[in-house]
Image (spheres, helix red, strand yellow):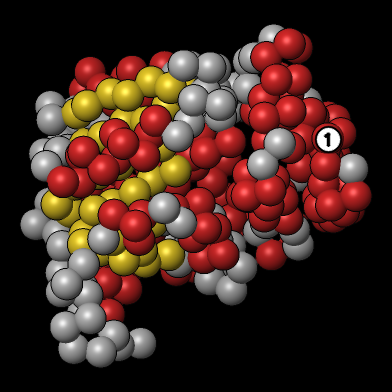
Amino acid sequence: MQFPPGRLLRHRAVLSPAVGYEQIHLLDSLPDLGCRVIGWSRPGYLRTPLDVGRTFAEQAYAAKALLDELGVGTVVVYGISGGGPIAIEFARRYPEQAEALILESAVTRHYAPAISPIAKTIYLSPLGTWLTAQLVQRLPRAALHDFVRQESTLDRQARRATVDWILADDQRLAYAKAVMAALTPFEDRAAGLDNDLRQWARLDDSTTAGITCPTLILHGTHDGDADPAHARHAATTIPQATLYLVPSGWHLLPLSINGATTRQARSTFLAE
């Protein structure tokens, strides 16, 4: 695939190594900042074969090959959640191409989550993810209550306030529905997730070593998936890192009550 000549030269390019390309909507505010977002499906997700790259180093190489094919020079690498390690790996291996790094709710060190049998049934099975996607359309309050409970350390009152806040706005609710709809079909993501779980468990505190580009770290204080310790670790081990913790923020910052403040943090960072 080739972009028309000069198309990307007028905008900062942002490479997002998310799970599937359809999750590009997680960064839908970046075009307002003059950015053009390049989303792709990492190996094992959707139609990208796992053989393209099992390790994060191999996936970073594949991302570089994609950028070379597109004719894209420097990029801001944006890693969200489990996409953090490949974003970090790309920035370390290709410093001439990574002009900056943004990590949002990102895994940055050893990560081997204890997944309860109920969570596996709901969020890590074909039937469970399909039912979840159906439930959020029909009974959004119930689906969101469970989702926030799984992905945050907020107390019951704060979880209820968060769900009420999401439901009070059509755009926020549509965003939440899109996120949960992206859980299915699980069969198209199972190979990538299984591989990620193995690769995350092999990470250690040296994961963030060697990053030389300016880095912005965005993380919620009540993230129940990637503990805020991941953000603090990155902030103390990356020389040019700026840490921005969102008060009462959970794993999905755009659906956190104070999450909108990250837009200003990103805008300032990109402008600098």
Q: Secondary structure at mark 1?
A: helix
Displayed quadrant of residue 192 = bottom right
Q: Position of residue 225 (x, y in %)?
A: 58, 27
Displayed quadrant of residue 203 = top left
Q: For the residue marked with disc 1, what is the amino acid?
A: Arg
**Can see residue 24?**
yes
Can you say whether 227 is above or below 30 in the image?
A: above
| Residue 195 left/right relative to 2 | right
Q: Which residue is mark 1?
A: 141
| Residue 118 left/right relative to 7 | right
| Residue 42 left/right relative to 236 | right
Can you say whether 168 is above or below 156 in the image?
A: below
Count the numbered circles shown: 1
Q: Residue at x 43, y 65 (%)?
A: 39
Q: Position of residue 112 (x, y in %)?
A: 56, 28
Q: Residue at x 46, y 56 (%)?
A: 28
Q: Position of residue 180 (x, y in %)?
A: 71, 49
